[in-house]
Image (cartoon, grey):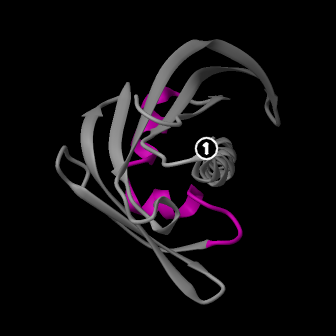
Amino acid sequence: MNGPVLKIEKKINADRTRLFRAWLDAENFTRWFLSGDPIVESVTIDPRPGGKFRIDMALNGTNLPHEGEYKTIEEPNKLVFTWRSHATGGRDTLVTITFTALPETTVEGPNGVLQKPQTLVTLIHERLANEAEIKSHTYGWTHILDAYSEWLNEKV
């Protein structure tokens, strides 16, 4: 790992296979990837090593494309892809997401107490150029993982 590295971890009350697959299904991806501004307008995903993806976001009438290529897809453990956008200066950066199963947790729901699977999602973003890129991506990825967790909890 060279240069600044961003690392975010989030425990989510969901099975790691469901969490993993949510990253590779375009229809579901558009539902959870961001909430609020910017807005995801379209998503194209070719979920295989060497396959490409494109996420078109809109902010104040401006299209902000985010593109990349899948490097590693090891269901349900690991997803590695390049990430290129206006916020990386058009350079390819590298994102690795791991999904680690944790012991089940007890959750109170409308139907009483439930045992739920729990997963630690770890996102590492490498090849960022400077602290400004780290800061903007920390903000973005944190909100994305929060929306991801909320969406999965609504689907239960």
Q: Residue furthest bottom?
A: 61
Magenta stretch: includes residue 63: no
Span shown in magenta: 15-38
Decide: few, some or many residues near mark 1? Use Cα within 10 Å; few <14, some 14-19, many ≥20.
some
The residue identified by callout 1 is 152
Residue 81 in percent (x, y) is at: 33, 45
Residue nearest the observer in this picture, 44 or 155: 44
- Residue displayed at 20% across by 54% down: 51
Residue 156 sits in quarter: top right
Quarter containing the N terminus: top left
Q: Residue at x 39, y 59 (%)?
A: 84
In the rendered image of this protein, does residue 107 appear above or below residue 67? above
Query: Percent position (x, y) of residue 123?
Result: 52, 34
Figure check: 66 above or below 56: above
Q: Residue furthest left?
A: 50
Q: Is residue 150 above or below residue 1?
A: below
- Residue 138 location (% of width, % of height): 64, 46
* Farthest-out residue, top: 103
